Image: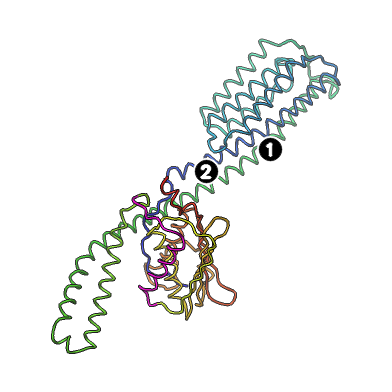
Amino acid sequence: MTQPEASLPTQIHGPGRHQALEEPHRSANANSLRQLVLVRWIAVVGQLVTISVVHWALGIALPLVPMFAVLAALALFNLVAMLRPRRRVTNTALLVGLLVDVATLTVQLYLSGGIANPFVFLYLLQVVLAAELLKAWSAWLVVALTCACVIGLTLFPGPVHLPGGPLGGLDNPYLFGLLLCFALIAVLLVVFIIRIRHIIRARDARLAAMRQRAAEEEHIVRMGLLASGAAHELGTPLATMAVILGDWQHLPHFASEPELLEDVTEMQAQVLRCKAIVSNILATAGETRGEEPRGTTLRAFLDDLVDEWKRSRAVRGFEYHDRIQRDAAIVSDVGLQQMLWNILDNALEASRSRVEMEATLFEGALVLTVRDDGPGFPPEMIERIGKPYQSSKGAPGRGLGLFLAVNVARTLGGTITAYNEPGGGAAVTVTLPLPALSLEQEEE
């Protein structure tokens, strides 16, 4: 299956470029929020175990009621963070979460020994998380607040006095707590930073894909401008040729020669077809799908598409299999029609004697499969389907048919896959979600 000269698919528009490029950042923030929620649950469980061990195992009296109340408030805040919509996670939301963590840690340290509590170094964990997740000004704000909290714990030691000092080895509760705090910070930092690096790599990959998509869409826009300009330039000579051929039909010399008259008639028909193609480009170049959409049904759209394609091409051995069990109301779209024509033209040019198209509905999507009995796709083309100028014809400027078709399908939320049949020939499968084609969505 080779690619014909590309026709410009118009009338189909995807999301704005700026909005598309912002989407990976939102996704990265949502993933970062998930990591904060996970670390906060670890903190809740860790504080619960630590308070119990210190109070009952080490015999250090702690104000259990206020400390457990703080833990309950932190757990409730974490539940709210889990239930909030993830699509609109901003830097401010992440900052608020870290500030709540700093505040609860400060209250717990104040109630359990103040600056003498070895777990005061957990502030460093909050600073590292802020540096990884937040914008620069937000990270510096967390640094300033944690320093202020440490100074406050120094000036206001709290109701509990803890014996401290570097002597006594692991039998000293202070040194044991210090060692436990160090191990906890080290483990959490490694786990968290590995996860964050994975999130950042995924975000960068999505940004690269979005930039590639934006570049391809700009390429399509440039081709649209060239096609529109060429259509304007070709209009006048085609009209002149149509008039001259019409005059020739009435000349005695041509009227007396049936073969010449038949040739002139065929030439005039082809010129009229060229004029129709040029007029179609000019008529659709400036339209949008939202301007006076023409409602139809899925079966009627595909039947008309196939009939018009067969009338305008020298089609041989074509079969259309309608396996749609439930019809649906859709918008008749010129761009979608041109996309499918490009794929059918590919199959027709590559086929030896047979081309077939099958239409089905599967899980709320329209699935169209076009097959031919030609030589199939070269392996290197299958790997680069959807890239411009990938053609087996070897002619300059060719190979845009599937490139444009893939972009049209992608803007509708669909996909196009190409593969070689086991028994020979090639197949292209177009999958389009029905909501993207429905009349109801267009009216909205």
Few, some or many residues within 10 Å of mark 1 (<14, 14–19, 20+):
few
Q: Is residue 31 above or below residue 11?
A: above
Find the distance from the CA under tag 2 to the CA under tag 1.
24 Å
| 286 is higher (above) or lower (below) than 419 | above
Circle 2/circle 1 CB separation < 8 Å: no
Q: Does the magenta run of residues contain 311?
A: yes
Vertical order, 341 against 104 (above or below): below
The residue to which callout 2 is attached is: 24
Q: Reading the chain from its start, which is encountered first: label 2 or label 1?
A: 2
Q: Find out whether residue 102 is within the magenta segment.
A: no
Q: Residue at left 65%, top 33%?
A: 37
Q: Secondary structure at mark 2?
A: helix
Q: Amino acid at mark 1?
A: Val
Q: Which residues are magenta?
A: 291-314
- Residue 12: x %, y % from top left: 40, 54
Asked whether, in this view, residue 342 is left or right of residue 383, the answer is left
Mark 1 element type: helix
Above or below 50: residue 289: below
Instruction: Name the image quarter holding residue 220.
Output: bottom left
Q: Dot 2: within a 10 Å radius of its alpha carbon, few (fewer than 14), some, or many (20 or more) residues?
A: many
The residue lying at 48 percent from left, 78 percent from top is 354
Foreground pick, 81 / 131: 81
Q: Nearer the viewer, residue 376 or 238?
A: 238
In this figure, which colouring scheme has been used for the structure?
rainbow
